[in-house]
Amino acid sequence: MLSILFYVSAAYCLLWLAWLAYVTWRLARRTGAPAPVALPASLPRVSILIAARNEAAALPRCLASVRALAYPPQLLEVLLGDDASTDATRAVAEAAMLGFGGAFQIIPITDTLGAARGKANVLAHLARRATTDYLLITDADIALPPTWVPSMLAHAAPGVGTVTGLTVVQGPGWLARCQGLDWLLSLASMQVATDAGQPITAMGNNMLVTRAAYRATGGYEALPFSITEDFALFEAVNAQGYGFRQLFEPAVRAASLPAGSWAALLRQRLRWMRGAAALPRKVQVSLVLFSGYWLAVVGLLLASRPAWALGAMALKIAAQGLMAGVAARRAGLPPPAGLVVVGYEFFSLALLTDLTLRRMFGPKRVDWKGRVYQ
């Protein structure tokens, strides 16, 4: 019995490492990465949509990056939806955008459109107010790169409905660095899948959707409610026959603030787990199978092979470090520090264990910005 456990565990580890090596190789070669198209001489006007609820602390950074965009300000329409904020969100936004050369509006959200709720409802209102053919969506805790608008537009070729940029997490401290590595590895894996033509998801904090594609879905007010509204819109656009692009390059690399505490991180990931239920079944199965490496290591220990278990862990850390280095280089970032790569193993194990227990035995509600969803 122990020999069977050993062979099964060892085989799983070898297959997992082989898969990671393949993903790293594909990522380094940029196989299937979408090519940009030339922008017209007469640049189009675009709308930037930002949903904000109690974001007075984060907005100055976000709006400063909007003002620094390398795109003619007179061609920018910036719409900020104030979702019943109880802090100084409106005053902070007005101060940050004072003297802006483009169009800027703060839209108070006081009613609900159709089936939309929460952030989806805010974006539904903003999309109705937008007057351009390109809707660029971001979050209040995001800092955009100056090249964001033209680089996203360069991939909005005819027939493409959504373009998703690269989002990284940056901040001081060990927890923030582990989150940054987690996002980098996860998005790198998704990039390889999307480069192969497999739609996975979109990032609602760094996303372009054409007005034609958005209207074809009926808008957020016509979509079934989802706590992961970006994925719901992405799927609806794809269902209408539109193509998609997912980018992994410095020109569209937005920086997100990290979750500031372990409790905030858990709330974020529980919300994502709720949204993952809508992913294609084969993607869900892949995620479950891919997260079992620690169980295989335990299997090696139970099979009385501690040296194999130690070797398996060392190989995992090395393989993930290599992949992170390749992903960082492609994203235009410095490679993660070795201590972060090692510490990430304990971070991911603790996070996976905590999330699993809370998902199994905790309340099923989801908390977002002070609102609770069942």
Image (spheres, rainbow, N blue to C red):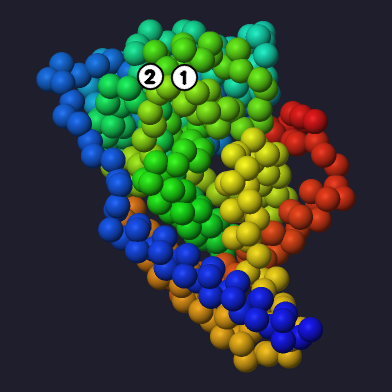
* Identity, as a three-letter code, of the amino acid under mark 1: Gln
Label 1 crowding class (10 Å Cα cut-off): few <14, some 14-19, many 20+?
few
Residue 40 figure quarter: top left
Residue at left offset 52%, top offset 45%: 257
Residue at left offset 48%, top offset 58%: 185
Query: Where does label 1 land, which residue?
Result: 240
Q: Is residue 214 visible?
A: yes
Query: Whole-percent x and y of residue 61?
Result: 44, 37
Query: Whole-percent x and y of residue 327?
Result: 38, 59
Say what secondary structure mark 1 lies in.
Answer: loop
Residue 76 figure quarter: top left
Residue 84 in the figure: left or right of residue 353: left
Q: How many marks?
A: 2
Query: Where does label 2 land, which residue?
Result: 210
How far is disc 1 from disc 2 in space, using C-alphas? 13 Å
Query: Whole-percent x and y of residue 62?
Result: 44, 34
Q: Is residue 238 above or below residue 31?
A: above
User: Which one is nearer the viewer's eye here, 169 or 185?
Assistant: 185
Residue 36 figure quarter: top left
* Identity, as a three-letter code, of the amino acid under mark 2: Thr
Comes first in the chain, label 1 or label 2? 2
Say what secondary structure mark 2 lies in.
Answer: strand
Residue at left offset 20%, top offset 19%: 43
